[in-house]
Image (cartoon, rainbow, N blue to C red):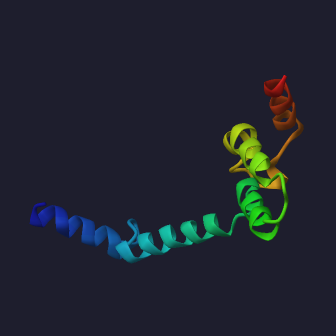
Amino acid sequence: MTPARAARIRAERIEGKLQSRKEIREQEEAARRAEQDRWTIARLWEQYKATNPEVKAINKDVDRFRRYLKDTVGMKEPGELVPLDVDRLRMNLQ
């Protein structure tokens, strides 16, 4: 890093052309919090397991979720599911 380059970067930050490190960290933190607040299929499944530990067939259900749903629809929110997702899942099970 040369003094001239550092001065140019500093000037761009002052002019608002570049974000400061603080702004970048705040955006990353907001994105991380937003990701944690998402209710994905996988998160709903974990919540179900935690609230229903007495279900006798929970081990089989865990295995089915891991095998068939986790990779295909696990990171989607329920509102993001489309009929095509269900059709693909059905085709993979046949």
- In the depicted view, which residue is nearer to us: 7 or 94? 94
**Residue at the extreme front of the image, as rendered:** 56
Quarter containing the C terminus: top right
- In the depicted view, which residue is nearer to us: 52 or 85? 52
13 sits left or right of 59 in the view: left
- Residue 38 in which image quadrant: bottom right
**Above-or-below relation of 53 to 75:** below
- In the depicted view, which residue is nearer to us: 38 or 54? 54
**Residue at the extreme left of the image, as rendered:** 2
Quarter containing the N terminus: bottom left
- Residue 68 in which image quadrant: top right
Q: Could you say where residue 63 lies in the image, as x and y percent from the top left?
A: 72, 44
Q: Residue at x 68, y 69 (%)?
A: 37
Q: Residue at x 17, y 61 (%)?
A: 5
**Above-or-below relation of 53 to 70:** below
- In the depicted view, which residue is nearer to us: 30 or 48? 48
Q: Residue at x 39, y 77 (%)?
A: 22
- Residue 54 in which image quadrant: bottom right
Q: Residue at x 73, y 57 (%)?
A: 40
**Residue at the extreme right of the image, as rendered:** 83
State the count of labels.
0
